[in-house]
């Protein structure tokens, strides 16, 4: 019950604070920018350089999904950092909500948005033919990725500036979504341990249960370790 | 001397907060990606990468730096210290520009771009970095959280970066050079693809003039809306 009340309060906070509301709409802006690029830049590249981007459609879609989920994770991470700096997090933790309730509340909100934007991205970018089941699964992975990024920033950064440094560095994780293209064995093996790699792989091969299992395992391990770290750090 | 000490202090702060380390990682990431691009795409992408990331890093970081220092009371101390607001701002600009230049040079050098005018790369990176860092300080006025800051940067980024599409070329597209971002990108592209020295000098002079005006405006806004508001 208390979760629902807090969730409602979050929605109220977002509706009242135009900056927060706009921030949550920012992924729509990002999706629109990418769509504009798809409509104008791809034909421009094809005409002027002869570069055919069609074989890379899965990678483009994966990039859009990861950037959106990552952005929501970064927003969540900074929201939590601000709440830690303002001692709001500590106050919420001594309410019946508790520490885990606070974390769940924060991550759940961004993750739900991540799922919505994931579906939106698939709808807007009709680049790759992916079955509905795979889209649902990818959206769950993307929501997980949001949580992972949020927790990485929150647990890794002592202050806002370190948070920004983390956010900047974490953008490099997106590279793992493209490692298939590089044909570097060491990089591919390294990528197995990072969530972005699996999201691309599932977009490319949406009918492989083995990939689903491996992707879920990697995501759960990351999220589990970070939640464990959060618990230890806060206690 | 005060400026030098402030710059040195900022550089140590940035080193401690992992700015240099993170840019080593980012540079390596870019180099891996760039090394797999076909020749014709690579020649366009590398200057764009240098322009869009290392040169603009000041805009990304300055918001957090000022908000943190505001929270720690550093800005209140600034009022009673001999360090002037202009020196405080310049120290931030110089220290962040050093990272920009190092990253730009590293990406270009290790990317093995065939023909490069190194002096122009340094000049264009310094000017672009200075403009975006100063812009970041202006945007920071009135922000209380990093999320607010990041959101406020979006319209400014669009205003500065969308005109850059004019470099694709269409009738009267040269008029867009009035936008400092377009002028800076022209200079940057010139460093890689070649540029007449007259055009490079004119662009540099224009951008330096813009930088100076932006600095004056930044000092005013910084004092009025960040320091004394605090």
Image (cartoon, helix red, strand yellow):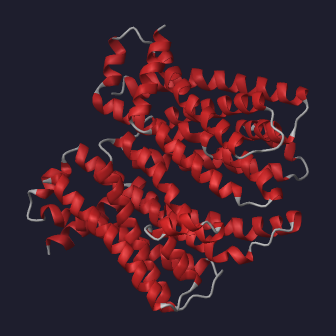
Image location (x, y in percent) of residue B145: 36, 44
Q: Is residue A29 visible?
A: no
Q: In this view, does A221 lie above or below B122?
A: below
Q: Is residue B75 visible?
A: yes
Residue drawn at the location 13% of the way across and 65% of the way down: A97
Image location (x, y in percent) of residue A68: 50, 65
Residue drawn at the location 32% of the way across and 71% of the way down: A221
The C terminus of chain B: image quadrant? top left
Image location (x, y in percent) of residue A151: 32, 59
Question: For the image shown, how many numbered marks are present on the structure?
Answer: 0
Q: Which is nearer the eye, B176 or B96?
A: B96
Q: Which is nearer the eye, A114 or B225?
A: A114
Q: In this view, does B15 lie above or below B170?
A: above
Would residue B192 appear left or right of B226 to someone viewing this image? right
Q: In which quarter of the image is residue A203?
A: bottom right
Q: Quadrant of residue A51?
A: bottom right
Residue drawn at the location 23% of the way across and 44% of the way down: A86
Q: In this view, does B81 lie above or below A128?
A: above
Would residue A76 appear left or right of B86 to someone viewing this image? left
Q: Quadrant of residue A35?
A: bottom right
Residue drawn at the location 60% of the way across and 41% of the way down: B54
Would residue A168 appear left or right of A159 to someone viewing this image? right
Image location (x, y in percent) of residue B120: 77, 30
Q: Which is nearer the eye, A229 or B174?
A: A229
Q: Which is nearer the eye, A75 or A12?
A: A75
């Amino acid at each position: 019950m208390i979760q629902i009340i807090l969730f409602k309060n979050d929605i109220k906070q977002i509706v009242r604070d135009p900056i927060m509301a706009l921030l949550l709409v920012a992924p729509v802006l990002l999706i629109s920018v990418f769509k504009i690029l798809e409509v104008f830049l791809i034909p421009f590249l094809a005409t002027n350089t002869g570069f055919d981007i069609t074989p890379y459609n899965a990678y483009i879609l994966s990039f859009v999904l990861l950037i959106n989920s990552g952005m929501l994770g970064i927003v969540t991470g900074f929201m939590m950092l601000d709440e830690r700096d303002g001692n709001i997090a500590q106050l919420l933790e001594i309410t019946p909500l508790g520490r885990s309730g606070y974390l769940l509340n924060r991550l759940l909100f961004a993750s739900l948005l991540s799922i919505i934007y994931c579906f939106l991205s698939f709808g807007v970018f009709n680049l790759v033919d992916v079955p509905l089941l795979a889209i649902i699964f990818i959206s769950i992975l993307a929501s997980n990725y949001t949580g992972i990024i949020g927790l990485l920033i929150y647990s890794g950064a002592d202050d806002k500036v370190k948070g920004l440094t983390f956010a900047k560095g974490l953008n490099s994780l997106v590279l793992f979504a493209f490692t298939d293209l590089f044909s570097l064995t060491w990089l591919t093996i390294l990528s197995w341990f990072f969530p972005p790699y699996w999201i691309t792989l599932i977009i490319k091969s949406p009918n492989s249960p083995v990939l689903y299992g491996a992707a879920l395992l990697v995501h759960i391990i990351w999220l589990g370790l970070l939640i464990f770290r959060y618990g230890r750090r806060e206690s | 001397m005060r400026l030098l000490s402030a710059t040195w202090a900022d550089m140590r702060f940035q080193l401690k907060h992992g700015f240099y380390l993170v840019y080593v990682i980012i540079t390596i990431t870019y180099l891996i990606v760039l090394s797999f691009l076909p020749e014709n795409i690579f020649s366009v992408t590398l200057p764009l990468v240098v322009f869009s990331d290392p040169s603009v890093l000041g805009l990304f970081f300055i918001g957090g730096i000022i908000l943190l220092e505001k929270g720690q009371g550093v800005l209140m101390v600034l009022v009673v210290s001999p360090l002037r607001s202009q020196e405080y701002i310049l120290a931030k600009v110089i220290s962040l520009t050093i990272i920009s230049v190092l990253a730009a040079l590293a990406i270009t050098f290790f990317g093995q771009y065939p023909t490069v005018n190194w002096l122009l790369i340094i000049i264009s990176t310094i000017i672009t970095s200075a403009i975006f860092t100063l812009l970041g300080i202006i945007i920071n006025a009135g922000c209380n959280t990093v999320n607010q800051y990041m959101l406020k940067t979006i319209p400014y980024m669009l205003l500065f970066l969308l005109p850059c599409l004019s470099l694709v070329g269409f009738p009267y597209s040269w008029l867009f050079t009035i936008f400092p971002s377009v002028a800076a990108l022209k200079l940057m592209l010139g460093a890689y693809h070649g540029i007449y020295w007259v055009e490079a000098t004119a662009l540099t002079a224009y951008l330096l003039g813009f930088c100076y005006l932006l600095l004056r405006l930044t000092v005013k806004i910084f004092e009025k809306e960040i320091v004394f508001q605090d």
